[in-house]
Image (cartoon, grey):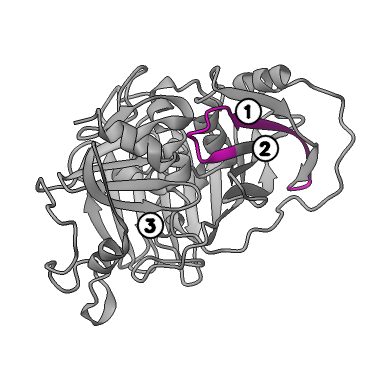
């Protein structure tokens, strides 16, 4: 079984998802591979791409560190570094444990200071569990279910991280490689040692000037040919805005006990209603309610604010505590009011900018998101109605 699947259905997500996952960062980025460059036989970029596409492993387990930094402060109500809440993966520095023994036996555990959150799949059974609240949810996949089912809340029991975020460097690399087309220059970087293992480095350079991504670096295990580290650099930055790397990895297949969940005493168990979300079939489009414009690195995700129009997009009239912030502070409203007003032939609204992802909130209720320049968002706003 190849652990590096060809997944064209993810094309709409690249590189938007790779950029969205780093919103809210604030951690200092360090180098996770700290050994001298190993001497490896030369391999071309094409050879490394083939290695990735044809990698064959029966299983693995390991510890993964995720770090993100957009230069933004941590937001109240959203867990930062050390939190075990799955939503916390969108910011700070986090440690995960991962186990893989085939597409139907996978587990991801987000380790926090006071507990952990797990998503695991064992055959047709999918469990999510939060130790801090001692709550678990069980989902049962239908007989003959999809080849790559997704778990609840966008979690991916087949290996995708909680809330749809990549849980391993392999998954992050899978999303980036889906964008390889004539708009991407692929080169070979320096060799490295990651988690005690020698690795080649593949570098992806977007050619389109409208992309905010400068380059993506993927460290590939020299023997097993699977990604060990994934780094995403924004234009104008010498440090990765997003980094996902193994700090320890073992390519022995994990035992069955790693994928069997027995609720601890006192656990509140809920049976999930409906079917967990699934990958769209090949050639599929964005999820319901969303559409995309463009392709590859300049893909823009287009959605709409629930409830229709948002005439002024101001937080002044929103009820206190809308964002669940302490002391009744209206965080959402304050954020909206802080965004600069913009307008043009395409309409008017507010623009939220970072060095890696931009968001355009239009007064007519549309929301445009992309790892692209504001000009690219304005261009799409003028055509996507």
Near mark 1 (Cα within 10 A), the count class, few <14, some 14-19 or many ≥20, is: some
| Residue 334 location (% of width, % of height) | 27, 69
Left or right: 183 as drawn, with respect to 357: right
- Evaluate if marks 2 and 1 touch, with contact meaning CB atoms under 8 Å apart: yes
- Residue 384 found in image quarter: top left
Residue where numbered disc 3 is placed: 87
Report crowding for label 2: few under 14, some 14 to 19, many 20 or more residues within 10 A (C-alpha): some
Residue 64 vertical position relative to residue 72 in the rendered view, above or below:
above
State the residue at coordinates (18%, 44%): 273
Of the pair 317 and 163, the residue shown nearer to us: 317
| Residue placed under numbered mark 2 in the picture | 251
Q: Earlier in the sequence, mark 2 or mark 3?
A: 3
Q: Is residue 290 left or right of residue 56?
A: left
Residue reaching furthest right?
39
Q: Main secondary structure of the magenta part?
A: strand
Magenta stretch, residue numbers? 195-214
Question: For residue 182, what is the image quadrant?
Answer: top right
Q: Position of residue 86 (x, y in %)?
A: 40, 56
Q: Which mark is residue 57?
A: 1
Q: How many angstroms separate mark 2 from mark 3 (CA)?
A: 29 Å
């Amino acid at each position: 079984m190849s652990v590096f699947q060809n997944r064209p259905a993810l094309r709409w997500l690249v590189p938007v998802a790779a950029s969205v996952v780093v919103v809210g960062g604030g951690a200092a980025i360090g180098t996770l591979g700290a050994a001298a460059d190993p001497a490896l036989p030369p391999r071309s970029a094409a050879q490394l791409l083939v290695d990735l596409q044809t990698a064959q492993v029966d299983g693995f387990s390991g510890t993964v560190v995720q770090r993100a930094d957009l230069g933004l402060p941590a937001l109240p109500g959203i867990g930062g570094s050390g939190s075990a809440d799955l939503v916390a993966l969108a910011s700070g520095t986090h440690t995960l444990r991962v186990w893989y023994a085939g597409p139907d036996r996978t587990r991801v555990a987000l380790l926090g200071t006071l507990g952990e959150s797990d998503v695991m799949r064992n055959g047709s059974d999918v469990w999510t569990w939060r130790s801090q609240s001692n709550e678990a949810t069980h989902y049962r996949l239908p007989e003959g279910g999809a080849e790559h089912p997704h778990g609840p809340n966008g979690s991916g029991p087949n290996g995708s991280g909680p809330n749809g975020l990549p849980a391993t460097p392999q998954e992050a690399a899978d999303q980036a490689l889906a964008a390889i087309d004539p708009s991407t220059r692929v080169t070979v970087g320096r060799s490295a040692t990651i988690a005690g293992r020698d690795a080649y480095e593949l570098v992806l350079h977007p050619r389109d000037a409208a992309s905010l991504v400068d380059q993506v670096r993927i460290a590939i295990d020299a023997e097993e040919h699977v990604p060990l580290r994934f780094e995403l650099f924004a234009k104008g930055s010498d440090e990765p805005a997003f980094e996902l790397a193994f700090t320890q990895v073992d390519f022995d297949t994990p035992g069955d006990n790693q994928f069997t969940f027995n609720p601890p005493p006192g656990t509140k168990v809920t049976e999930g209603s409906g079917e967990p979300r699934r990958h769209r079939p090949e050639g599929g489009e964005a999820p319901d309610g969303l559409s995309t414009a463009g392709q590859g690195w300049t893909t823009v995700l287009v959605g709409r604010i629930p409830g229709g129009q948002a005439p002024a997009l101001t937080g002044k009239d929103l009820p206190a505590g809308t964002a669940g912030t302490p002391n009744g502070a209206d965080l959402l409203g304050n954020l909206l009011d802080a965004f600069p007003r913009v307008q043009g032939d395409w309409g008017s609204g507010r623009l939220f900018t970072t060095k890696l992802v931009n968001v355009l909130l239009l007064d007519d209720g549309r929301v445009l998101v992309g790892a692209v320049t504001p000009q690219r968002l304005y261009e799409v706003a003028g055509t996507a109605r």
